[in-house]
Amino acid sequence: MVFRAINIDTTKLLSLPESGMGYQVIQDMRPNNMAKYLVFNAELILPMDGTLSQNIQAIRQRGYDQLLRNAINFSVPTNNYKLLTGLEYRTGILNLTDSLINYRQRHRYGTAAKDNPSEKANGHEVFVRVSAYEKDKRIDFINRKLLPGTYTTTLSDYTICVNTNDNPIDRYALPSDEEIRWAFYIQPKSWDYLKRGVVQPAFGHHGGGLEALFESGTSVGTYLHTTAYGK
């Protein structure tokens, strides 16, 4: 069964940080439930049970929009679920191979961004958020900024991913196999803060790309533009 977030759910989900770039993992905290759910773009919600791989495959085969249209409304009250991070949800952990390190320039060692100290942006560096969705809800297109708790990668790591013909889904350990179609460019102000780290393995993917977490979001006017992925 696939669920669709109603407006109050989307508002709540966007007020919470991401678990990783483009997704959240939440858990129903009611004693008789405790179910876990994988959320895409703060609107499509998949139970993390035996149907997960089938539903993820359905996104690619039938399309995200069709799956969302046919989903039923999510019924867990917003005050009854919490965000999960890291080891609370990671499955299918893989170790980086020498080939990925040498030829795709992945990073074997390093901690996740959320576990590292905050630092100030320098006002010049550009970051990139990759996504399957042109209308990525973590970007405030009106005020041209990132919402708090949003992940990106660095422009340099994105460029390496494209130039080495690496798989962004595996590099950034994304839970869906849906094609990455868009790249959003962000240039934080010198007073914006971020945490840097290395993408940890998850969902049967290796990780090893670089990630940046903007816990407080970015300032107005920091979203630059969108391009097709790899362009």
Image: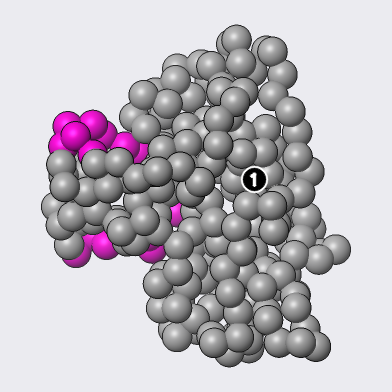
User: Is residue 201 found left or right of 7 in the rendered image?
Assistant: right
x 54%, y 87%: residue: 79
**91 left or right, relative to 65:** right
**Residue 207, above or below 17:** above
Magenta stretch, main secondary structure, is loop
Q: Is 66 displayed left or right of 183 in the figure?
A: right
Is 90 in front, or is 228?
90
Highlighted range, magenta: 121-142
Residue lying at 30% horizontally and 41% vertically, measured from the top left: 119
5 left or right, relative to 72: left
User: In the rendered image, which quarter contains the N terminus?
Assistant: bottom right
Q: Amino acid at mark 1?
A: Asp
Q: Position of residue 17 (x, y in %)?
A: 45, 62
Q: Secondary structure at mark 1?
A: loop
Residue underneath mark 1: 177
Q: Is residue 34 magenta?
A: no
* Quarter in which the C terminus is drawn: top left
Query: Would residue 133 be counted in the magenta stretch?
Result: yes
Q: Position of residue 28 (x, y in %)?
A: 68, 79
Report the residue that reaches farthest toward the front: 117
Q: Is residue 220 visible?
A: yes
Q: Is residue 166 above or below residue 43?
A: above
Residue drawn 16% across the image and 47% down it: 191
Q: Residue furthest right?
A: 50
